[in-house]
Image (tube, rainbow, N blue to C red):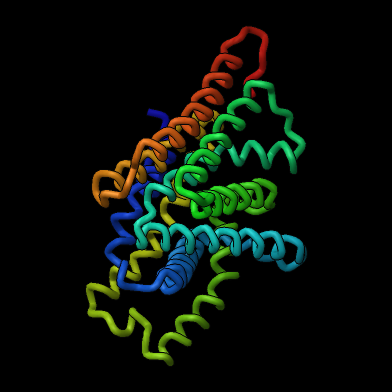
Amino acid sequence: MNPGIAYALGAYIVWGMFPLYFRLLESVPAPQILAHRMVWSALLVLLILLALRRWSWVRQVYRQPAVLGRFTASALVLACNWLTYIWSVNNGHVVEASLGYYINPLMNVALGTVLLHERMRPLQWAAVAVAAVGVLWMAFGVGHMPWLALILAVSFSSYSLLRKIAPLGSLEGLALETAVLLPLALLYLGWTSLQGSNAFSLGDLDFKLLLMASGPVTAIPLLMFAAGARRIPFSLLGILQYTTPTLLLVLGVTVYHEAFGPSKALGFGLVWAGIALYIAESMLRRRRPGQAPA
């Protein structure tokens, strides 16, 4: 097996199994879990940088303030995605979170078209339209827009876009993002300690270790994803990406027994149809002689 497939698939499987980890922390408010993800991720990335002695990028950040600005934006968007995801999992919305990550690749296409001026073919537009109808159908069926799914899709797509145009590598970029978020996380955790509500100080040793594990749980799949993305075609990466929302959907329905009635099933079906149409169009185009891959 191409090691890139193993790296990418491993990252997607870990992300898809996240509810099993976050449900162990459901007694902790989502902002506290987010803060611990920031703190322990920053510490882990720092240790990796020390082991690899990769510090030359710091001079680039110092000389180009715009780099810091871009990564500040990507860090804030990533924090928004993390907070929404944690809250969704621990408040019984795993199925809706899975919808967000089904929509995410098509949202990437839309952002690439609008902001990067990438051209879309007619069938690709049709795929996005079918998925959009699925989202609107679910909004009609439940009486409101699936805001959690849309926030997850838009935030992660925005993060992907910002990282695509960023000048630093995956490890260096993650280091800068966690460095940006670290002061906010420490201030918030300090405030909760003064209020007597810091779950880390109130918990036993096992619970402390569980919170500390949020560092490697966060950083390792991000680094695996970056390693896989460099080794396999982007189209294959996109197909493997659907591992995550599929696992989320299975967990939400079978383990956490969330509602998945006919109306929601039809909405998901339309989203899946849009995804299938987009993948099929891309694969057929790649197989045509004389055509460059999309």
Q: Quadrant of the C terminus?
A: top right
Say how many tags the image has: 0
Question: Where in the figure is residue 100, as x and y percent of width and height?
Answer: 49, 46
Question: Where in the figure is residue 21, as x and y percent of width and height?
Answer: 30, 59
Residue at 51%, 29% in the rendered image: 275
In the current view of this chain or complex, which residue is farthest to the bottom? 194
Asked where in the image residue 3 lies, by quadrant, the reply is top left
Above or below, 59 against 253 in this view is: below
- Left or right of 14 on screen, residue 123: right
Whether residue 254 is visible here, answered yes or no, is yes
Residue at 45%, 57% in the rendered image: 85
Q: Quadrant of the N terminus?
A: top left
Residue at 31%, 41% in the rendered image: 250
- Left or right of 223 on screen, residue 67: right
Above or below, 160 against 180 in this view is: above
Residue at 55%, 50% in the rendered image: 150
Toward the viewer: 290 or 189?
189
Above or below, 59 against 127 in this view is: below
Toward the viewer: 286 or 2?
286
Whether residue 227 is visible here, answered yes or no, is no
Toward the viewer: 77 or 12?
77
Question: Where in the figure is residue 23, as x and y percent of width and height?
Answer: 30, 61
Toward the viewer: 124 or 12?
124
Asked where in the image residue 199 lies, by quadrant, the reply is bottom left
Question: Where in the figure is residue 240, as x and y percent of width and height?
Answer: 44, 34
